[in-house]
Amino acid sequence: MVGLVGLIVGMVVLRNEWGPRPPSPEYADAPHLLPTLAGARPEGPWAAPAELGALLTALWDETEPDRVPEVLRRPVQPVYAALRADGTQLAEHWGTQGPTQLHALREALAVLRPHAHPSQDPPVLTLELAFSHPPRTQRLPDASRFFRSRATQGIVGFEFSWQGHVERHSPTSIVAANVSHDHLLGSFLSRQGIGPERLGEVGVRTFAAQQVLHVFGPEPRTFLMDRGNRLVTIDEVSEENVRQLADLARTWLFENLDERGRMTYLVRPSDPQVVRSNNMVRQWMATVAMGRAAHRDDDAEAWAQVARNIDYNLRAFYRERDGHGLILYGGKVKLGAVALAALALLEHPNRERWRAQEAALQRSMRYLWNDDGSFQGFYLPEGRNGQQNFYPGEALLYWAFLYRENRDPELLARIRKSFEYYREWHLTPENRNPAFVPWHTQAYTVVWDVTRDEEMQAFIFEMNDWLVDTMLEWNPRSALPDLQGRYYNARLPFGIPHASSTGVYLEGLIDAFRIARTAGDRERAERYRLAILRGLRSIMQLQFVDEVDMFYIPRDQRRRVLGGIRTDVHNNEIRCDNVQHNLMGILKILDTFAPEDYRHP
């Protein structure tokens, strides 16, 4: 059946992580999808939350409401309702009966009401609602492009029908389960045993829906949702809110550090199972991020936790060979992991404790550096190269901090040689890649702070001008406003949208902003400032912050989620680098921006 799903919906083939990736139309804000969304975000308010909340409270208590919002007097469309207790679903139902939306809502609530059992310690009960708009018919297999789209995941719902059997999926349930459209279709075809020859007989309709969350209690609260969340506007990017963003991200990192010192690599909020995958580059970046948070807060206890994390990582993954310090995982030793491990040790106040390991890691970096200024990307497997957009910049970042500390002219000469090599390499059209920009920006900024090197300054500006022009997604007239501010271009072959990408670009952009302001380049500084604010809006949209965006997460699991940053608006997975990159960028923004820098045009 997997082959069938691939045939029908054009599922994306897994790509080699080391090679270039083709453009990603499945993530594009495709014009052909927009009519489906026309009713999802009306110009005016769909309904006043207070008025809607009073209605829901009355209907749940089986009393007559004082007033019924006009939108519920419209002709009936299916209404989805799910009852949850502390985030765990108790029951769900689609109301379809009656002449109006209100009748369908009453039907759904009547089915759910018996599942709300009182107790001495009652849980927090919530209603998750989706009021569907008139559907649009899709035809198989012609609709494969629609089913590949991720841009509408969590906005659009589905109705599948086959020989009298009807199956509906609410946009909110899609968010809660974190499933793709093609997965939903493939599962339906599999359950019904439908082969390729009968696709034309399958009924498929898509619909937008108004999403609502109602929280019961002594003071009931009602929220209008957008893709299972509240929409963050650019006006909310204030200094206070950015500090809260940083505080919650910090909380996530330290909460996901276990008693052994191991950092959680990946949390899937829709799946309580522990994820076994891992990545040493990202693990050591998490160590660096926690150290910078501890430094900023002057927090001795946090520094002790960072030390525990370092000790765990060294026990589990550090090895030596021929005097070279190695970070070994899965038979690979990556230059980036070696460099970031060394950086984590360098920045810890008890650095002397790991002096021998840091010196051995330094020897590995020197061993992987070539006389022309290039780096070999891997120590193991021997002879393997690659990841030139990532690992050399990470190594140069460590060398830059080391140079700032020791002012060694030989080290500066090596950095300068690599700068010249990689500037030419990056500006070659076939090598141009946004992933290169933030690492080299940060490394050359540290050197620039000491040397005021004009060529490095010019290259920093050239890289970041291109990054903002090429990758920043900002179209306030878009039908998908929750995507605004992310760094992603569906027309270019640079992979999928990802919170960690936006985070690392912010790390570099705030350095470029500071240099532009120091150099008196007001126009460029303003351009970078706006790009940073827009990126912050995107990250604020992606962070788990409260009962609304965690409505489907059991309360006993929310500790693993609070403060975490989703991979994208449609994908709630929290990978550690989603959080650490953004935290490190935000800490620099807080240290660099003046209060007036948070103003909006």
Image (cartoon, rainbow, N blue to C red):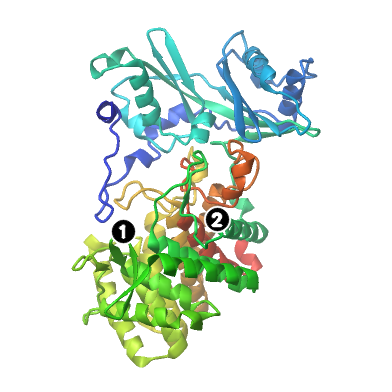
**Is residue 601 among what the camera can see?**
no
Residue lying at 52% horizontally and 61% vertically, measured from the top left: 260
- In terms of image quadrants, where is residue 597? bottom right
Closer-to-camera residue (35/166): 166
Helix, strand or loop under label 1 = loop
Residue lying at 43% horizontally and 68% vertically, measured from the top left: 315
On the rendered image, what quadrant is the C terminus found in?
A: bottom right
Mark 2 burial class by Cα count in 10 Å: few <14, some 14-19, many 20+:
many
Residue lying at 33% horizontally and 19% vertically, measured from the top left: 139
Residue 256's tag is 2
Q: Is 542 situated left or right of 153 in this image?
A: right
Closer-to-camera residue (85/160): 85
On the rendered image, what quadrant is the N terminus found in?
A: top left
Residue 330's tag is 1
Look at the picture and state if 562 lies above or below 533: above
Say which amino acid is labelled 2.
Answer: Asn
Closer-to-camera residue (173/339): 339
